[in-house]
Amino acid sequence: MQLSGRNQLKGKVTAVELGKVMASIKIEIAEPDVITAAITKESAENLGLKEGDDVTAIIKSTEVIVGK
């Protein structure tokens, strides 16, 4: 997969909190550094995100995109 976002941080999901519309995904990128991505609940479910998953946080301007 090629992406226009150049800032890619590999990490591990430490928490998935699903709301009615949005989801909060906490990603440990280097202990103890954690970033939080706010994505749609539908995206979190489609990716099957769960604690312990290895993911990549892709940061572009004001967005954090999560790829699995």
Image (cartoon, grey):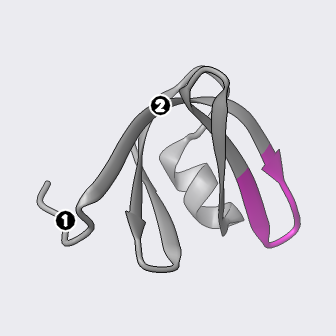
Vertical comparison of 35 with 15: above or below: below
Magenta stretch contains residue 43: no
Question: What span is colored magenta in the figure?
Answer: 17-24
Residue located beneath label 1 in the image: 3
Quadrant hosting residue 16? top right
Quadrant hosting residue 52? top right
Q: In which quarter of the image is the C terminus?
A: top left
Instruction: Residue 59 in the image: state x and y as whole percent.
Output: 41, 63
Mark 1 vs mark 2, CA separation in Å = 18 Å
Q: What residue appears at the point 61 percent right and 20 percent down from the top-left corner?
A: 31
Vertical comparison of 29 with 41: above or below: above
Among the two numbered marks 1 and 2 on one chain, the one whose residue lies closer to the N terminus: 1
Instruction: Residue 23 in the image: state x and y as whole percent.
Output: 74, 59
Q: Report whether 22 appears left or right of 34.
A: right
For label 1, count other residues whose C-alpha is less than 10 Å away and answer few (under 14), some (14-19) or many (20+): few
Under mark 1, the amino acid is Leu
Nearer to me, 47 or 66 = 66
